[in-house]
Amino acid sequence: MTDVTQVLADEFGSTAVVDAKRLRERATSYWDSSPTEAKCLVRPESTEQLSQALRICHQHGQTVVTQGGLTGIVQGAASTPGDVIVSLERMTEIESVDAVDGVATVQAGAILQSVQEQMASQGFLFPVDFGARGSCTIGGAVATNAGGINVLRYGMMRNVVLGLEAVLADGTVISSMNQMLKNNTGYDLKQLFIGSEGTLGIVTRVVVRLFPLPVSRDTAMFACESFEAVARQLGSLKANLAGTLSAFEVMWGSYFNAVTGPGAHASPFEHDYPFYVIAEAEGANPDVDAERFQRLLEQGMESGDIVDAILPKSESERRALWNIREEFDVALPAYLYDVSLPIRHMETYVARLKKRLADWRSDAVFEVFGHIADGNLHIFVKPYADGEHHAASDEIVYGCLEGLDGSISAEHGIGIDKKSWLHLSRDDDELELMRGLKRLLDPGNLLNPGKIID
Amino acid sequence: MTDVTQVLADEFGSTAVVDAKRLRERATSYWDSSPTEAKCLVRPESTEQLSQALRICHQHGQTVVTQGGLTGIVQGAASTPGDVIVSLERMTEIESVDAVDGVATVQAGAILQSVQEQMASQGFLFPVDFGARGSCTIGGAVATNAGGINVLRYGMMRNVVLGLEAVLADGTVISSMNQMLKNNTGYDLKQLFIGSEGTLGIVTRVVVRLFPLPVSRDTAMFACESFEAVARQLGSLKANLAGTLSAFEVMWGSYFNAVTGPGAHASPFEHDYPFYVIAEAEGANPDVDAERFQRLLEQGMESGDIVDAILPKSESERRALWNIREEFDVALPAYLYDVSLPIRHMETYVARLKKRLADWRSDAVFEVFGHIADGNLHIFVKPYADGEHHAASDEIVYGCLEGLDGSISAEHGIGIDKKSWLHLSRDDDELELMRGLKRLLDPGNLLNPGKIID
């Protein structure tokens, strides 16, 4: 059989095709500095070029792994020495921004933060936001249906994508570049590619919905003595902020204590509490909005639900509060989890987890935080021992979801990492239908093989 | 071959199975009073019963048409004498409402207005709303991805559905009853059934997202001299109402004049204008919200964009304004269209339409209104002559979309009515993928055959 790398290099040249040797200069991922292993990496500069590359791979029965910013944590973009990697790092253009309609067309290789900044410079908010914003790509965010901190108000990536273009395993280009909020012309094909982790097609261009840039922003970090109080405050802020509540991040004391203290972040509080919340609202009327936000916090304090609160007086103070939530390197290494379950079951879940982890090892430690309005908890479990305890830890974290209507992946996806646990969240008929979709769109199992399902 | 009606009647009894004769007492649809034609109508009382009924139909190679409230206007639920009809009219229960999580589980046969009212009585807003609310079902709204007047703020039905259960053609039950905003455990199967008009599966139960019931509501009808002024006002209200703008309905003068006057609605204005808008905002702070809303209208008047405005002083005055938009029987009969296109192309489109309709017939009349923030225009074309001019009218209305990034169906779906025009909005590769999905989920072409695609 002809060497597929040679065919690709002959077709596209050495700028577009990085060979195996040069590829080893690239790290595997943000989390793993070992060299990238693959036959080669193809960097198309257009959808047509990608289509042609995939046609060549298809003819050679060649597996293809698509990589974005490599910030994912479920090995959803992991390659093997036998794969060809596709990277859209040369397709980073913002092709158009329409101010009247509030839509932009973006190439999939664009970095999230760059898109956010370019939209902001034109008066628009691109609302999907999360810690990896500086490295991750729009295409990766679509492929993983990324979530983050503003889902409560703006939804996940799925809710922001109006249209997209994707290339199938055989090179067919599916162009569904809808620009409107309403378009019911048959099956909504774009949904197939959002959140399918590169297993059904490679997203090349995306039409996204923009929102007005907020004028006011009010932030607080407050403390509560009980989870019920936290949940009541969420309900109160949702009801009284009329859709302007944009973040409600909860940190259990275990997490907060792990990331604050000597050598870590400074706690803004004098005392320890069981729960800490960062709430943020973004509105259009600075004076009125600030007054309303503060009045709601005062009401929370009067009711006893809020026992302490900090209102940042500057952007740097605000950033310092957010860093407690977003910069958690000091708490690592740990097994990092991302589960979702209804708010009403969260206390039960955390109590179960505590008991089962203690039963497992006397030195087990866990830290909890997350976007509870989205049903999303992140959990760190330690001691981390180079994977040694990984399966046991997985079994406990996922096993504790039983009967609580939860899922093993809120926003991180399945990749390779969670594949063996997917049956806990999906029954046999769902899995069979997923396999059917995979067979329909990629009968040769060439696109990101071994991810999500086998 | 055994008579499938007899098998179903033997299995489920005469309460569950309405025979062909009794069925003729039912009207075909809201729009067509001729008798319903089919072998029989099955009214399951549970998902299990529906699954069993579909298994029986599958064994008999029997086609099945699912009917909801029969308010659709693209013949998406039309039956033939050889079909079995499924109606979920006995599955109307609201199974649960969870106040902490803001989610409800609803059976697909429940009437939309009933769900809205029951949620409101518990302090929650079910946000999907449109004229047919008193007759249409939740299942029908899911199957057609219904839109309506609040899409600007809350999205279409797709955005409100967190999870669902559907029965496939062979009786397999796909249960994806997710309750969280975040759940990335593999392919999001529920998306297959939303908006697929009963051709891929029959939706039986739905988990929906609820929103806080608004406390304030501010409404205005205003007039503009130009479409640019209308579009600027939309931009201003979106930017300054911080996500509380819930409706922005535009009526061209042609529509407004057709539904106001002697024997019709009373116009609240003394003069005629080229454009009329109903804007509505729903918030949580009555005093502040009303003041802000009025200040924005005043700014609009000062800028010259708004040339006249009415603020209703009571709910009945408000209702009277909305009736101008929603009760348009006096303008019927007409060919009724529902297209979508970017706002920036709307003036071009309407001008094209005017010219081509005039070229077609000197007595051609058209009236335009719609949800422009969603890119959605509705159009009435007359003279209506029992279908005589239908194809010519279709060709003009859809043909004028060429090159304007539009779609032939914003929210009404495709059904039978728009099937022959679908190629104007979807290319061959998209249509082939749609057919592939149909073959995968319904290889025998038994579910709602002949709708959307062949």
Image (tube, coloured by chain):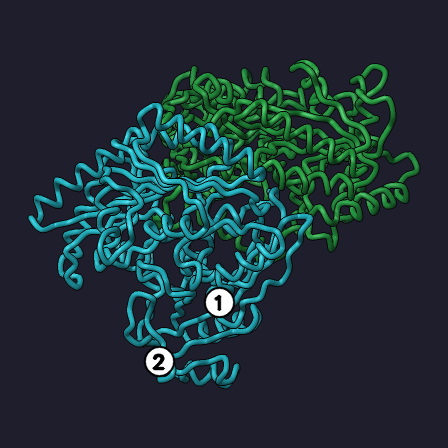
Chain colours: A green, B cyan
- Badge 1 sits on which subunit? B
Residue B277 in sight: yes
Q: Residue A414: where, in percent of width, then height?
A: 62, 40
Establish if A265 lies above or below A237: above
Residue B426 in sight: no
Establish if B198 lies above or below B231: below
Front residue of this view, candidates B247 and A99 = B247
Label 1 close to label 2 by CB (< 8 Å): no
Ranked by sequence position, the earlier of labels 1 and 2 is: 2
Q: Which mark, by number, is residue B251?
A: none
The residue tagged with tag 2: helix, strand or loop?
Answer: loop
Q: Amino acid at mark 2?
A: Glu
| Res A216 quadrant in image | top right
A167 relative position to A400: left or right = left
Q: Amino acid at mark 1?
A: Asp
Q: Residue at label 2?
A: B25
The residue tagged with tag 1: helix, strand or loop?
Answer: loop
**Quadrant of the image for the N terminus of chain B?**
bottom left
Front residue of this view, candidates B435 and A322 = A322
The residues bearing labels 1 and 2 have C-alpha atoms spaced at a distance of 30 Å
| Res A304 quadrant in image | top right
Disc 1 residue crowd, few under 14, some 14–19, many 20+, Cα 10 Å: many
Q: How many marks?
A: 2
Residue at image position (40%, 25%) is: B299
A77 relative position to A444: left or right = right
Q: Residue at label 1?
A: B170
Q: Residue A203: where, in percent of width, then height?
A: 45, 33
Residue at image position (35%, 60%) is: B72
